[in-house]
Image (cartoon, grey):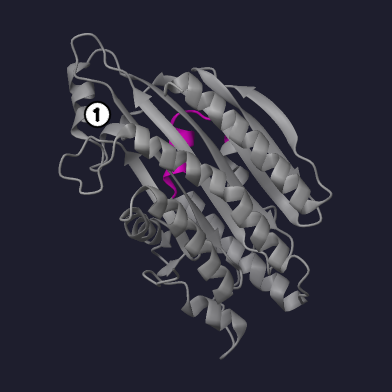
């Protein structure tokens, strides 16, 4: 298969279909509702929402493929490649055009013993313009888990599965991308991680000659595909382990507080949210990641030796789960 934006787009649509089917079967009641949308500046997407099921209270599996003028903030971040900056400087009168496509998923379950999960895989490119430097393209994505209550066996299972995916392609990827997730999914003003992390990567390509993790774009594309395909079997297993566990009103109140932390991260720190809003994306799709109901309590303190305290003590970077 030739790797270009058309074949990547088709593959992502098929992935969306497959994941939606798996989640419907795991829930056993709710079905996804689809809304197709068009972005005035270029492109559009398929938003699929599932809600009020046996397991899933609210969730979304979103596909998008958008294009247009590259937003200014792309050129203001230090981690962007020098070739991106050169494209801007050589095209002072006309902004470079970008194309971005991806699948994004967030699932908020009913039962507080079932974790929240997020996945995103994305592809970005800016073709070369006449008289300018070469174009740029990269892959990004990752999967991370946000348990309301951290069960160590589940955390080890989750990270072990992700490590297997990484090790299949590059033995250095898990440690690198696990650290990246720990650092990225960090609520700095709370001094705690959003959940137990996972893997996170961005701008994966061959631009950096000094990158010791460098692989060809074709090999990284195969890794990127495997990350996307790992989502359903991992999360379905976690659903089946926990969906029938009993819970109390206290557990539900704790779930609302943990959802509140999730909201804080997504609205303050998440770059995907920023990218969508900066590029005039569809607001309902961008904010799909937020739960239906969340909570905040002033100066909340956990009870000593409680399961809530145990969870807070595990919301830290650099825990070796796998």
Q: Quadrant of residue 302?
A: bottom right
Tell me where residue 6 appears, x and y as whole percent: 49, 19
Q: Residue at x 78, y 68 (%)?
A: 244
Residue 59 shows in the view:
yes
The residue indicated by pointer 1 is: 84
> Along the line of sight, which residue is nearer the eye, 35 or 226?
226
Sort mark 1 into few (<14), some (14-19) or many (20+) by Cα contacts within 10 Å: some
- Mark 1 residue element: helix
Q: Is residue 93 above or below residue 146?
A: above
Q: Residue furthest top?
A: 130
Tell me where residue 33 appears, x and y as whole percent: 76, 35
Q: Residue at x 20, y 28 (%)?
A: 83
Q: Is residue 84 above or below residue 254?
A: above
Tell me where residue 104 appears, x and y as whole percent: 55, 41
Residue 282 shows in the view:
no
> Along the line of sight, which residue is nearer the eye, 106 or 205?
205
Residue 259 lies in the magenta stretch:
no
Residue 276 lies in the magenta stretch:
yes
Q: Quadrant of residue 73?
A: top left
Instruction: Say which quadrant the C terminus sits in.
Output: bottom left
Q: Residue at x 58, y 62 (%)?
A: 260
Tell me where residue 219 appears, x and y as whole percent: 36, 37
Residue range highlighted in magenta: 270-283
> Along the line of sight, which residue is nearer the eye, 15 or 181?
15
């Amino acid at each position: 298969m030739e790797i270009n934006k058309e074949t990547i787009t088709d593959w992502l649509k098929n992935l969306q279909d497959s994941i939606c089917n798996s989640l419907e079967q795991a829930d056993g009641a709710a079905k996804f509702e689809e809304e197709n949308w068009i972005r005035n500046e270029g492109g559009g997407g398929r938003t699929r929402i599932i809600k009020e099921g046996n397991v899933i209270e609210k969730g979304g599996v979103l596909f998008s493929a958008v294009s247009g003028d590259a937003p200014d903030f792309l050129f203001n971040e230090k981690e962007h490649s020098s070739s991106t900056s050169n494209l801007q400087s050589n095209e002072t009168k006309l902004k470079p055009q970008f194309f971005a496509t991806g699948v994004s998923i967030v699932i908020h379950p009913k039962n507080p013993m079932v974790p929240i999960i997020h996945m995103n895989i994305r592809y970005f490119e800016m073709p070369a313009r006449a008289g300018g430097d070469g174009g740029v393209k990269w892959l990004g994505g990752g999967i991370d888990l946000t348990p309301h209550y951290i069960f160590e066996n589940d955390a080890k299972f989750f990270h072990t599965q992700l490590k297997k995916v990484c090790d299949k392609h590059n033995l250095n990827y898990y440690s690198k991308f696990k650290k990246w997730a720990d650092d990225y999914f960090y609520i700095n003003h709370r001094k705690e991680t959003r959940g137990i992390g996972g893997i996170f990567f961005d701008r994966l390509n061959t631009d950096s000659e000094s990158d010791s993790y460098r692989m060809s774009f074709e090999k990284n594309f195969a890794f990127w595909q495997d990350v996307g395909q790992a989502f359903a079997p991992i999360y379905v297993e976690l659903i089946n382990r926990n969906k029938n566990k009993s819970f109390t009103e206290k557990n539900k109140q704790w779930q609302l507080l943990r959802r509140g932390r999730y909201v804080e991260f997504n609205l303050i720190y998440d770059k995907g949210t920023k990218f969508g809003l900066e590029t005039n994306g569809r607001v309902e799709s961008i904010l799909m990641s937020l739960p239906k109901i969340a909570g905040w309590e002033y100066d909340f303190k956990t009870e000593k030796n409680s399961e809530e305290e145990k969870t807070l003590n595990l919301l830290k970077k650099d825990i070796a789960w796998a």
